[in-house]
Image (cartoon, coloured by chain):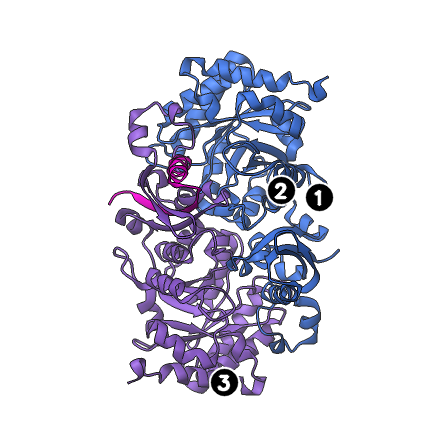
Chain colours: A purple, B blue
Amino acid sequence: MDDIIAHYRLRADDAKEAADRAQKIAIEQSVECPLDAVRDPCIRNEIVGKVLQVRPAPDGLFDIAIELCAKTVGRDAGQLINMLFGNTSMHADVSLEDAEIPERLLDAFGGPNHGLAGVRALAGAPRRALTCSALKPQGMAPKELAALAREFARGGVDFIKDDHGLADQDYSPFAERVPACAAAMREAERETGRLTHYIPSLWGSFEEIDRRLELAEREGLRAAMLAPALIGVSDFVALKRRRPRFAFFAHPSFTGGARVSPQLYNKLYRIFGADAVIFPTFGGRFGYGRETCQAITEAARGPLGRLRPAAPAPAGGLTLRRVAETLDFYGPDTMLLIGGDLLLAERHELAGETAAFVRAVETFSFGGS
Amino acid sequence: MDDIIAHYRLRADDAKEAADRAQKIAIEQSVECPLDAVRDPCIRNEIVGKVLQVRPAPDGLFDIAIELCAKTVGRDAGQLINMLFGNTSMHADVSLEDAEIPERLLDAFGGPNHGLAGVRALAGAPRRALTCSALKPQGMAPKELAALAREFARGGVDFIKDDHGLADQDYSPFAERVPACAAAMREAERETGRLTHYIPSLWGSFEEIDRRLELAEREGLRAAMLAPALIGVSDFVALKRRRPRFAFFAHPSFTGGARVSPQLYNKLYRIFGADAVIFPTFGGRFGYGRETCQAITEAARGPLGRLRPAAPAPAGGLTLRRVAETLDFYGPDTMLLIGGDLLLAERHELAGETAAFVRAVETFSFGGS
């Protein structure tokens, strides 16, 4: 397969209307002008999108498959999404469900630098599920966040991420927060003999983010988190290349699940370079069901050309009590992220509560054996 | 008003459920953790989002207004959207309808460098409506695109934009396309005595885009187009500051109208620096109604703190026959963008067809007087 196959779901009154709309989408997502204005036969044959399939789906919807010429993408991540769903996103009755990306393009983006195995290596955990917590609430000063991080680290968690709301606010400037939290990790390591990895949240323009990664690198950090849907996927690819030492955690902020499927977002994030993908797991604060979570997990770590698997990191309302159920569902190639539930503990109990989370994950017996 | 007021629309079974969801959104979009885990009273009072209003709307929906602390945004555009709709975008039953942005934040972003008046100055047209066409279909080589552009320019159109699908493809590399089209503008100017402005489409990472703007600047270009939703709004702000000579045209690609209102997208684009905003007009290929187009126009050129008005540029299926109706609706402070409809003309008729478009706009008598 040399070209892209995009899968849309469309509302239409009948099969005829669906076929007509499919043809319109094929034109909108390729040449974007009346076919009669396309005079060059090569462009007609090669560049104009081709409807491959129009198939009825439940609830008056239709599944549509359209082949899009990979040459229209060049090698740019933003342009890939532009060609998949740029203008069609403005039609409220169409969603983008999936996209098959040709191997040549997969290789051009290159996927994760480290992937699941690299994230495991950071934690020194080749087989078991991984653990992660989150620094919240925002509004806290760097010193307070660092104190909180130290308690999590004393509890032995593998990773601690910034709340994705932590950016570069006056009450918590990046340049103060990151050294403070990095120092807290080193302090806790001296006490426990084990290094917890702090994952700062990156916002800003490309140059701001790059400077922040430089600072994080000087502080010895090895992982960072960003929201590709907001910072721009092309920048994400550029940053992954510019800072290959880092494992990148993709945050799902602004992925607006209803119009682009969560599994496709996570597949694209892996293709663009995410080493771990954070997503809302079933039964928590968000409405994703088990099927969606299964599809996201497959997108993160299932076969995808020559690309490394990424670590799926279910989150969004996980609790200590749900560790067993969650591990049973996702298996050991997973990073469990519990933030708010741990923070309900009083400060002097936080390290102990975190240790209980870590123990529950590390001692979990898969398959009940 | 010092803080942000975000307006959401939510599906709920009754007012009690709506109030409960509103409170959850207020937490999700601020501290993102259980309220019991927020121990600092200052954070509780200042940082946690506040539900200002829950009001029934038609069709079982509810309108919700939430105050969000502006300090959580810092001065970053991506973070502004993250705080408005980052995680809540993943709830399929909520849409973000509008946001009131405090003046301090408006001034921090600064809005358009040139705005409508600057775009008018480029065209040498202080009062009348402006005209624009588009280079399509993609797949054409730079020489062919330049020949097409020359015909449009000979027809006297004010602006010619790249199709937003034109990026940096092997069949049309940016570094060849832009000099070729810029030269075609100069050639046509020698013939007609009037300079048409060519607007290249920008894709890529920040650094790629910045290099492309540098090249465009060397070629004497004064305007460029980009899709902030895909290249990243923070980069857009940084580029606007780095390249103040350019008028920036915001393309609506990937703005997925159903979940974030088109008027808010366009308001944000103006705040971040768009001098002109392109959007699908009523009655064309997209489903936006007159009311939505009116709201977009208001967002583009209505009062907004100290920010310059931007030029609204209705597009997306406009035809020569619809010029009068369209001008009657939008008035003279508007740029009409017709692409595909002009391209239906045979090549030797294209300059004449473009001239007819230009004449229809320039001689239009508002109010039928």
The answer to whether residue A189 is above or below residue B146 is below
Q: Earlier in the sequence, mark 1 or mark 2?
A: 2
**In this picture, which residue range is highlighted in magenta?**
A1-28
Q: Are marks 2 and 3 in contact (CB under 8 Å)?
A: no
- Give the amino acid at mark 1: Leu
| Label 1–label 2 contact, CB within 8 A | yes
Residue where numbered disc 2 is placed: B270
Q: Secondary structure at mark 3?
A: helix
> In the rendered image, which quarter is residue A157 located in?
bottom left
Relative vertical location of residue A143 with respect to residue B286 in this rendering, above or below: below
In 3D space, how far apart are the residues under numbered discs 2 and 3 (Cα atoms)?
47 Å
**Residue A204 to residue A120: above or below:** above
Residue at 73% from the left image edge and 57% from the top image edge? B2
Image quadrant holding the C terminus of chain A, namely bottom left
The label shown at residue A353 is: 3
Q: Amino acid at mark 3?
A: Glu
Magenta stretch: residue A26 in it? yes
Instruction: Provide residue A258's location: percent of width, then percent of height.
Output: 48, 54
Instruction: Name the residue carrying label 1.
Output: B304
Residue A221 visible at all? no
Q: Looking at the picture, how far across and down is residue B101, in whole percent?
A: 68, 52
Q: Assign a secondary structure to mark 1.
A: loop
User: Tag 2: residue type?
Assistant: Arg
- Find the residue positioned furthest to the right: B1
Q: Is residue B347 left or right of residue B328?
A: left
The foreground one among B246 and B319 is: B319
Residue neighbourhood size for the residue with mark 2, other residues' Cα within 10 Å, grouped as few (<14), some (14–19), many (≥20): many
- What chain does badge 3 belong to? A
Mark 1 vs mark 3, CA separation in Å: 49 Å
